[in-house]
């Protein structure tokens, strides 16, 4: 119904209006510059290019240099109808990429901002076209204002009428009696524009949320971390096949024989690395000064950052592309000095740590993943120097068809006693996109994730499981999440496998179904490789979901003599919305696609406010705001890793704005509260100027204050200044933007 080409047809319609109508077009507009600078030194979220990149901006550096020309066109169509167009020619030289510099459809920088026709039909007032409709008026926050999506390029800084994205709609309204009104809406489906929520990641954007960076960030985003991690898996798979763990004897089954060794078992243990190219269990406790009992996490980091570069048999002077080189957050490093066991007093000793109990890196979060799981993430590659490579990730938008639409109504009434109230219902696609992860084959088909328990084979002749026995994934068994959790407590690790819908084709460099036949003769060294179907692709699917929104509002003016007081409220119940749920147990065992899921949730949100006017036209507004998640998930749990470290295995609702590898993928709030205070006052001989100040405090300690002043120099020249200050706990919606605090000046010339 609302196809993208409707934009062009609407412009064409405006161009072919009757000549008489064109001749009577009223044209107004303005030219404006807005320039803002950072008020603090520092680095914004997602700005770093690598784990060790601490470059940022200086106080006084430009945040925005935006120039715009706005044209408003108004005209008549016949005697009863009018039309309106709002053209917005805008360019910000400081935008982090083309999307944020100039024109982009359905954003704050859309050239064609509005285009609509006003007419009447059968007693209804109709507004048809691209427009804005406002249902909610809360200060500094959108609650009932759900008809139009929002461009969050400047978070909450922009005025709502600028941040709101006009969309195509049918807007029908009529009065009922003297005190009532009903409005019907049928509107286009369009999503909120959230910086970084795309495969590019928008690195350097000043208002990139931590939660978004955790998805798409170049350093901390799973979209980039997963492929980098899989390259390390390829390094270990190659090492195993080339005999690194078997005294140099080639091992065709590779990591499929390592279902009993986990990431923490390797990183938290000690290894005899005294012979180049070989890794055997250490002879004692981990000791950085003893190469026969060397700490595993140093070796893990060496493989992660450098791959096979410099290893025996690898071409001299060639850099292994499977090495991460400190780019993505695989291990918690502060530098990338190459490992040199002969000099244990240099910087490499302190540049990496291992603390899965306070995880801040990908491998720490995946401390219970088996090395057999690593095989699933790898492929043979004839172009790779080692012959092996990892997986890749892709981003797919799966949005509603053009024929889909949102629809709803609002009924308003005013009583003789001074109470104004409304109820509204909106059946719509939620404006905040969902992201779901899945493994896909080369044809794009979704693969089935299998959680396989471990089979034990006594191959060293000593009774009971030993480190040098053989452990393989049991491909005949698929565990539920709870079964895998119970197995872990019994000492049986789970390996993550991926297969097609028939269960006959397994993915990874090596086929795990070929392990048991190869072991039938008791010799794992004399069999041909059982080739797998190669590494699957990790797909990030961006989509929208249907929501039923039921809302209400009221405002009531109390007669307080010389001090007018207005009490007001807005209420919204959302049925069928979604929430991000983190399962840290599944993440720990490497089940990536099930560890981060969007799940159904209903929400109840409300705002209660009071407005008073004191002194000479000083408006003071206070608000209490609460967001309640009616399906909040909080299932606390802990696990013990292979080396006895207690780690978080909880399942919970994450805090989307702030969840990050740096804060334990932060849990959200079942009930989150905000408090706001707003002041507004005109000043000047004719009250022609105005200052406004809004302060919002969020539960958890985040704070935002915006002071803005509008100054009228002449009837056609206006100036403005604005100071946005963010501070408080860095793991809050506002506090995370402390380094994005800014000061802005603006100048506008109005023409008619």
Image (tube, helix red, strand yellow):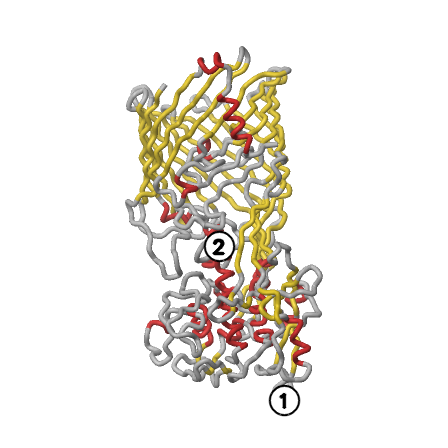
Q: Is residue 717 above or below residue 515?
A: above
Number of the label disc, if any, that sits on residue 140: none
| Rendered image quadrant of residue 707 | top left
Q: Quadrant of the N terminus?
A: top right
Say whether disc 1 or disc 2 marks the residue closer to the N-terminus: 2
Which structural element holds mark 2?
A: helix
**Residue 359 at x, y percent in the picture:** 48, 64
Q: CA distance from mark 1 to mark 2?
A: 47 Å
> What is the residue that sits farthest to the top in this orientation?
79
| Rendered image quadrant of residue 549 | top right
- Residue that appears at 37% across and 69% down: 351
> Which of the pair 136/102 is nearer the observer?
102
Give the residue pinned by disc 1.
Answer: 461
Query: Total marks drawn?
Result: 2
Q: Quadrant of the C terminus?
A: top left
- Residue that appears at 48% across and 54% down: 214
Give the residue pinned by disc 2.
Answer: 214
**Residue 211 at x, y percent in the picture:** 49, 51
Judged left or right of residue 667, residue 57 is: left
> What is the residue that sits farthest to the front in this orientation?
382
- Residue that appears at 40% across and 31% down: 89
| Rendered image quadrant of residue 86 | top left
Which structural element holds mark 1?
A: loop
Q: Is residue 134 above or below residue 222?
A: above
User: Is the residue marked by circle 1 packed among few (<14), some (14-19), or many (20+) residues within 10 Å?
Assistant: few
> Which of the pair 326/509 is nearer the observer?
509
Q: Is residue 98 above or below residue 82?
A: below
User: Is the residue marked by circle 2 packed among few (<14), some (14-19), or many (20+) residues within 10 Å?
Assistant: many
**Residue 52 at x, y percent in the picture:** 37, 61
**Residue 439 at x, y percent in the picture:** 60, 58
């Amino acid at each position: 119904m609302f196809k993208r080409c409707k934009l062009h047809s609407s412009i064409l319609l405006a161009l072919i209006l009757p000549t008489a109508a064109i001749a009577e077009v009223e044209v107004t507009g303005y030219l404006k510059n807005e320039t803002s600078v950072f008020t603090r030194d520092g680095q914004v979220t997602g700005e770093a290019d690598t784990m060790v990149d601490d470059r940022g901006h200086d106080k006084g550096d430009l945040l925005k240099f935006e120039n715009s020309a706005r044209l408003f066109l108004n005209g008549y169509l016949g005697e009863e109808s009018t039309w309106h167009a709002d053209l917005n020619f805008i360019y910000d030289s400081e935008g982090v990429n083309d999307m944020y510099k100039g024109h982009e459809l359905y954003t704050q920088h859309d050239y064609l901002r509005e285009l609509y026709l006003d007419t009447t039909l059968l007693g209804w007032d109709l507004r048809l076209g691209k427009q804005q409709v406002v249902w909610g008026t809360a200060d500094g926050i959108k609650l009932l204002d759900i008809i139009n999506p929002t461009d969050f390029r400047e978070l909450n800084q922009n005025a709502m009428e600028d941040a709101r994205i006009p969309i195509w709609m049918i807007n029908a309204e009529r009065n009922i009696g003297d005190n009532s009104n009903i409005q019907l809406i049928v509107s286009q489906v369009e999503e909120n524009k959230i910086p970084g929520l795309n495969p590019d990641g928008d690195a350097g954007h000043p208002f990139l949320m931590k939660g978004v960076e955790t998805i798409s960030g170049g350093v901390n985003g799973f979209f980039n971390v997963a492929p980098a991690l899989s390259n390390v898996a390829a390094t270990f798979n190659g090492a195993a096949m080339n005999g690194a763990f078997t005294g140099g004897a080639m091992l065709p089954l590779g990591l499929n024989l390592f279902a009993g060794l986990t990431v923490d078992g390797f990183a938290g243990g000690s290894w005899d690395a005294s012979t180049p190219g070989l890794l055997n269990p250490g002879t004692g406790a981990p000791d950085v000064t003893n190469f026969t009992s060397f700490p595993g996490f140093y070796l893990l980091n060496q493989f992660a950052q450098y791959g096979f570069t410099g290893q025996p048999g690898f071409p001299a002077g060639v850099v292994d592309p499977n090495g991460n080189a400190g780019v993505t957050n695989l291990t918690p490093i502060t530098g990338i000095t190459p490992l040199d066991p002969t000099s244990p007093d240099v910087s490499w000793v302190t540049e990496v740590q291992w603390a899965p109990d306070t995880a801040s890196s990908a491998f720490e979060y995946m401390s219970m993943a088996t090395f057999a799981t690593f095989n699933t993430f790898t492929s043979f590659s004839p172009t790779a120097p080692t012959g092996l490579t990892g997986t890749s990730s892709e981003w797919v938008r799966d949005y509603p068809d053009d024929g889909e639409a949102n629809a709803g109504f609002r009924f308003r009434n005013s009583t003789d006693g001074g109470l104004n109230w409304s109820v509204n219902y909106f059946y719509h696609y939620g404006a905040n996109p969902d992201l779901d992860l899945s493994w896909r084959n080369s044809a794009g088909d979704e693969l089935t994730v299998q959680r396989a328990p471990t089979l034990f084979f006594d191959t060293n002749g000593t009774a009971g499981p030993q480190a040098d026995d053989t452990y393989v994934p049991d491909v005949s068994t698929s565990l539920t999440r709870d079964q895998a959790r119970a197995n872990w407590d019994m000492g049986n690790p789970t390996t993550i496998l991926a297969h097609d819908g028939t269960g006959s084709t397994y993915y990874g460099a090596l086929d795990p179904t070929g392990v048991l036949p190869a072991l039938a003769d008791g010799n794992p060294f004399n069999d041909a490789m059982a080739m797998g179907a190669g590494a699957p692709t990790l797909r990030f699917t961006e989509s929208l979901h249907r929501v039923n929104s039921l809302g209400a509002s009221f405002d009531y003016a109390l007669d307080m003599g010389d001090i007018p007081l207005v009490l007001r409220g807005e209420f919204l119940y959302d049925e069928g919305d979604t929430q991000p749920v983190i399962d840290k147990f599944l993440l720990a065992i490497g089940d990536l696609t099930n560890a981060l899921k969007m799940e159904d949730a209903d929400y109840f949100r409300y705002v209660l406010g009071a407005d008073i006017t004191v002194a000479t036209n000083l408006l003071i507004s206070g608000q209490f705001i609460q967001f309640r998640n009616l399906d909040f998930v909080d299932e606390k749990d802990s696990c013990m890793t292979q080396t006895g470290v207690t780690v978080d295995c909880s399942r919970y609702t994450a805090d989307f704005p702030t969840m990050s590898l740096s804060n334990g993928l932060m849990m959200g709030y079942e009930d989150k509260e905000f408090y706001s205070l707003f002041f507004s006052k005109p000043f000047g001989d004719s009250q022609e100027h105005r200052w406004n100040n809004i302060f919002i405090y969020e539960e958890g300690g985040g704070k935002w204050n915006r002071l803005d002043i509008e100054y009228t120099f002449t009837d056609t020249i206006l100036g403005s200044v604005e100071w946005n200050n963010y501070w408080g706990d860095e793991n809050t919606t506002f506090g995370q933007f402390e380094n994005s605090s800014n000061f802005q000046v603006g100048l506008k010339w109005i023409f008619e």
